Image (cartoon, grey):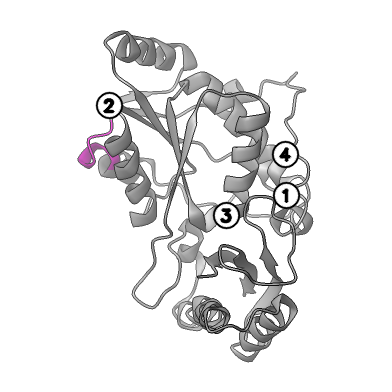
């Protein structure tokens, strides 16, 4: 595995791989890798011939009172995990190179970015879209892989890719979960043992709502309110609980098959997101 920090060196490697007839797969991450990330890497390797994984904790997508400073950073462990997955290139861009002092451009994807995380974290998806656009231009992949856990992010990136004519095929890997159902997340490391035990109620509430919808209880408002009540009973503080069309992220009144129930909760100082699709 090559470890690259400069965009010029990255482009040289990608150009050489493509010149030899190989297709380029790409997985963007913020590091502190877990099995969920590695499942995306395996999907990228199956769907391409040359795999690039980036690790970049993007300051543009963090708000002023969020966890940029304490976000877990485990470069050595991450590199070892990626090497064991036969990744071809680990790209570790430098924030000063990504965003020089006179950097003044941003990418904003309206509509799909406005509810959910976009409403709770103003400016978050502008930071996501800007960095993903830059990384797409730096890596020039044929295939890019994202995780369903970040459902709204997937919708934002998909719309940006379509609207700006990026010649990239997007793949979405399923959410990987712990044995008790909690979605794997780098932020799970923030949880104390007691908070970790309580956090299991989060996916459980979503699964129960999904099952009720599968049995024909289709009212989105009632399903959402039931989830909020169950979360509060479990001592979890919901930021939002919505039923949406996953393509547009627009709220829906009926939880029809293929719609998504998504939520964010706070547990102490930690904030987690998750979603399930209605069967």
Asked if residue 242 lies in the magenta stretch, the reply is no
| Residue in front for this viewpoint, 176 or 221 | 221
Percent x, y of residue 264? 64, 67
Res. 109 in view: yes
Q: Which comes sooner in the sequence, label 2 or label 3?
A: 2
Query: Per the image, is 84 magenta?
Result: yes
Q: Residue 11 has which mark?
A: none
Q: Residue at coordinates 51% horizontally, 58% vertically from top-left?
A: 149
Range of magenta residues: 82-87
Spatial separation of the CA atoms under disc 4 and disc 2: 31 Å
Locate residue 18: give its quadrant: top left
Judging by the rendered image, the residue that carries numbered circle 3 is: 151
**Res 59 seen here:** no
What residue would you read off at disc 4? 126
Residue picked out by circle 2: 49
- Give the residue drawn at x 49%, y 43%: 30
The residue labelled by disc 1 is 63
Q: Quadrant of the N terminus?
A: top left
8 versus 242 height, above or below: above
The reply to whether dot 4 and dot 3 touch (C-beta < 8 Å) is no
């Amino acid at each position: 595995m090559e470890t690259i920090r400069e965009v010029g060196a990255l482009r040289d490697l990608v150009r050489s791989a493509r010149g030899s007839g190989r297709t380029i797969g790409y997985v963007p991450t913020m590091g502190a890798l877990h099995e969920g990330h590695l499942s995306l890497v395996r999907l990228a390797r199956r769907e391409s011939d040359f795999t690039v994984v980036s690790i970049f904790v993007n300051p543009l997508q963090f708000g002023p009172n969020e966890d940029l400073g304490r976000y877990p950073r485990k470069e050595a462990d991450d590199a070892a995990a990626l090497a064991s997955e036969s990744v071809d290139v680990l790209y570790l861009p430098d924030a000063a190179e990504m965003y020089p002092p006179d950097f003044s451009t941003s990418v904003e994807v309206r509509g799909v970015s406005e509810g959910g995380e976009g409403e709770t974290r103003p400016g978050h998806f502008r930071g996501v879209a800007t960095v993903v656009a830059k990384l797409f231009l730096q890596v020039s992949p044929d295939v890019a892989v994202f995780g369903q856990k970040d459902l709204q992010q997937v919708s934002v990136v998909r719309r940006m890719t379509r609207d700006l004519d990026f010649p990239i095929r997007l793949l979405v890997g399923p959410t990987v979960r712990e044995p008790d159902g909690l979605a794997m997340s780098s932020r799970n490391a923030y949880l104390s043992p007691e908070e970790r035990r309580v956090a299991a109620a989060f996916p459980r509430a979503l699964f129960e709502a999904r099952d009720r919808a599968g049995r024909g209880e289709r009212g989105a408002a009632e399903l959402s309110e039931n989830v909020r009540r169950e979360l509060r009973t479990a001592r979890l503080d919901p930021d939002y609980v919505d039923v949406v069309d996953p393509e547009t992220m627009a709220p829906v009144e009926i939880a029809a098959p293929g719609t998504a129930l998504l939520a964010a909760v706070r547990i102490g100082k930690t904030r987690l997101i998750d979603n399930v699709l209605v069967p």
